[in-house]
Image (cartoon, rainbow, N blue to C red):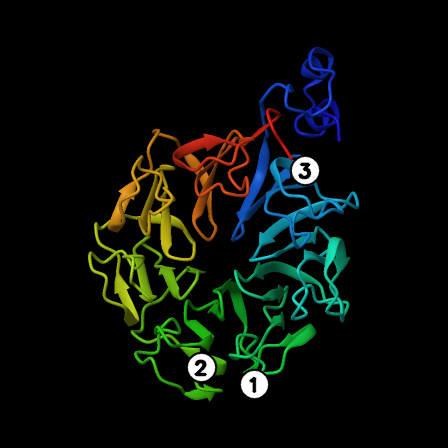
Amino acid sequence: MTLTRAVAILGGLVAAEVAFGCKRSGTSPSLPIMVTAISAGDFHTCGLSNTTAAYCWGLNTLGQLGDGSSTSSAAPVAVSGGLSLHVLTTGYGHSCGLTSAGAAYCWGNNDSGELGDGSTTTSSIPVVVSGGLTFRALATSPGFHSCGLTSPGAGYCWGSNRLGQLGDGSTTDRAIPAAVSGGLTFSALARGRVHTCGLSSAGAAYCWGYNGSGQLGTGSTTGPELCGAYPCSSTPVAVAGGVSFRALAAGGDHTCGLTSSGAAYCWGNNNAGQLGDGSSTSSSAPGAVSGSLSFSALAIGELHTCGLTSAGTAYCWGSNRYGQLGDGTTTNGSTPIAVSGGFSFSALAAGWDHTCGLTSAGTAYCWGANTYGQLGNGSTTNSSIPVAVSWGLASR
């Protein structure tokens, strides 16, 4: 794609098109990409333009950028197929999007059937999820499964299921969507690496899948089942503590929820301080995040967590080896730390060890690991402070 076409798509900047009539290359100018939504996968990131076109950047060895190739890119590339998407979600080696009509498409790795097209064939272009279901929300795992939520609130999952993370009462992988057992009606879904959670309209949280770190929140790191030699639940189990949540987020092996007042609670693995309670002690039941901050949204990576206040201030805690907390250091934090730069964000997304924020003006910023170009700033240099996602400079 030429830079001029990209600029035209992302905001109708006709003047810039005339001034910068050149191809994306090492000599192209750097222009901010304006997006309406952003999602961070393990080693790649995707965003939606204001024309609902999808763009991705970062690692692409499994086709997770969706541009028909397996070539990684340190700057955004267009997802093939010309789909108009309204929801994007990214996982380990795959990505998924949702049209306004509720049709789900996925692309990238498919070893366990996580693309949901009835096959286990990897695809570097979007393929439609089988079953004819109409979804209103999607969640792709940083592992090898995906889930969708229908308008009536039924949960469906597909892909890897060896630890019960699909919630269908089995440990059998599914290459097409399988209904989550129990007849529960959910208002939202959250996906971890090998566990999944759902939130009822009444604010009750349920989780299923692997529970070795207490990420199911039942107050135990055992059962109620064994999936092979590992503690798990292949059907939804209630999160302990009686806390009523309005939002959930899940990452590697931990889970967090937000109450109606904006208080954050986390549970599961805490070896890097990702539960935010000032310790490195794991917990199998919800515990309050320190600092008495009120959050409007949460985003969870592999070993770090971030929260967004209603004023748009981002805070992160947990592992900071690559600068994913965004405070200008690489020092871990077990309590919330403000992201540097004084930015006001409208949304956050967290990958394995990078984080991104979106301003209300549509400018995307990312920070943390950048080995594969997942920060989208044309380089492969890590950054411990936010850098703008931009076109040009270096892409492939």
- Mark 1 or mark 3, whichever is nearer to me: 3
- Outermost residue toward the right? 81
Q: CA distance from mark 2 to mark 1?
A: 11 Å
Viewer-nearest residue: 385 or 138: 385
Inspect this view and state whether residue 299 appears: yes
Give amino acid for label 3.
Val
Residue at image position (76%, 71%) is 118
Give amino acid for label 2.
Cys
Residue at image position (73%, 64%) is 129
Mark 1 secondary-structure assignment: loop
Q: Answer left or right for 285 relative to 396.
A: left
In the image, is residue 15 above or below residue 224? above
Mark 2 secondary-structure assignment: strand
Q: Which of the numbered marks, if any, corresponds to residue 77?
A: 3
Residue at image position (44%, 88%) is 225
In the image, is residue 358 above or below residue 243? above
Return the x and y of residue 305 as percentages of the image width and height.
36, 53
The residue that disc 1 covers is 169
**Label 1: how many Cα within 10 Å (few below 14, some 14–19, many 20+):** some
The residue that disc 2 covers is 232
Viewer-nearest residue: 330 or 288: 330
Comes first in the chain, label 3 or label 2 = 3
Quadrant assignment, res 258: bottom left
Residue at image position (63%, 23%) is 26
Return the x and y of residue 219 as percentages of the image width and height.
30, 78
Comes first in the chain, label 2 or label 1 = 1
Which image quarter holds the N terminus? Answer: top right
Return the x and y of residue 378 as percentages of the image width and height.
56, 30
Count every numbered label the image shows and give the total.
3
